[in-house]
Amino acid sequence: MRTPYIAGNWKMNMTPSEGAKYAAELRKAVEDAKADVKVMVAPPFVTIPAVVEALKGSSIIVAAQNMANHTSGAYTGEVAPAMLKDLGVNTVILGHSERRSYYAESDEFINSKVLLAIQEGMDVVLCVGETLEEREAGKLEEVLSRQIKVGLKDVSADQMSHITIAYEPVWAIGTGKTATPEDADSAHAFIRDTVKDLYNNDIAENLIIQYGGSVKANNVKALMAKENIDGALVGGASLSVDLFLPIITFDK
Ligand code: PEP
């Protein structure tokens, strides 16, 4: 049985004071809703302390959107895992398509961050997904397979309980276009099979695979009804409690 995992990626939105206000509202709404769902929010780095403070004692997880691939040192502008952990942050999103495309993060580079996060005892949401060009060229499986195999290189079977995979077709992120539940489910099934080949059936069956790409209140239920879709990574619709709560409570 896989517990649904709904995550909000705030990207470069929300100042510390806005984040604190939002977090207090979300906390109350989630407590009142009593949904049997794991909920996470990923604020920008500087907003994290205010959100952690507002969510102290709540079950809502606070994650980072990115992290350095080094533990400390002369890496201007970077944030080390120990800095996140010191704030109480133990989860990090890695390999988001915006990091891959705007900041040229390669699968190998992302893998180095995955390994460091795990070595530091953190949980990882590893994002994978194809561009429209890749999909239209029939390369969906080739791309997913490479992103998973390289992204998880040297992650042991025991460490896989710290990994969540988010399937985010790049053409569906922030565009209002969503993969059909059938297309998303088939990509998720392919991801699960790939993980089964790399590890074993139990690990693949227990793996949480989130879907991301214009998830909204009006499409979440159909997506979550699919066998291989275990959660959502939500961008735009996570930026207000009014839009995010109905996604969290999709099952109510
Ligand atoms: C995302 O940022 O991971 C995302 C899926 O964004 P959106 O929901 O806005 O498409």
Image: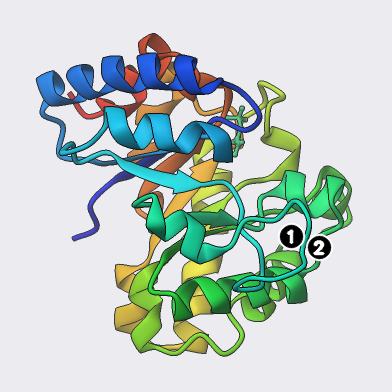
Q: Position of residue 50 (x, y in %)?
A: 40, 29
- Of the numbered discs in the image, which one, if any, rests on residue 110? none
Q: Nearer the viewer, residue 10 or 46?
A: 46
Q: Nearer the viewer, residue 120 or 87?
A: 87
- Does residue 8 show up? no
Asked if marks 2 and 1 touch (Cβ < 8 Å), the reply is: yes
Write the residue at 50% across / 19% down. Answer: 239
Residue under label 1: 140
Query: Outermost residue, front direction?
Result: 74
- Left or right of 161? Residue 64 is right
Above or below — where is 157 with respect to 223? below
Write the residue at 44% across / 88% down. Answer: 199
Say few, some or many: other residues with alpha carbon within 10 Å of mark 1 (under 14 / 14 to 19 / 20 or more): some
- Does residue 244 show up? yes
Three-letter code, disc 2: Lys
- Left or right of 39? Residue 94 is right
Callout 1: CB less than 8 Å from ligand 1: no
Residue under label 2: 139
Q: Position of residue 235 (x, y in %)?
A: 56, 30
Q: Position of residue 130 (x, y in %)?
A: 75, 53
Three-letter code, disc 1: Leu
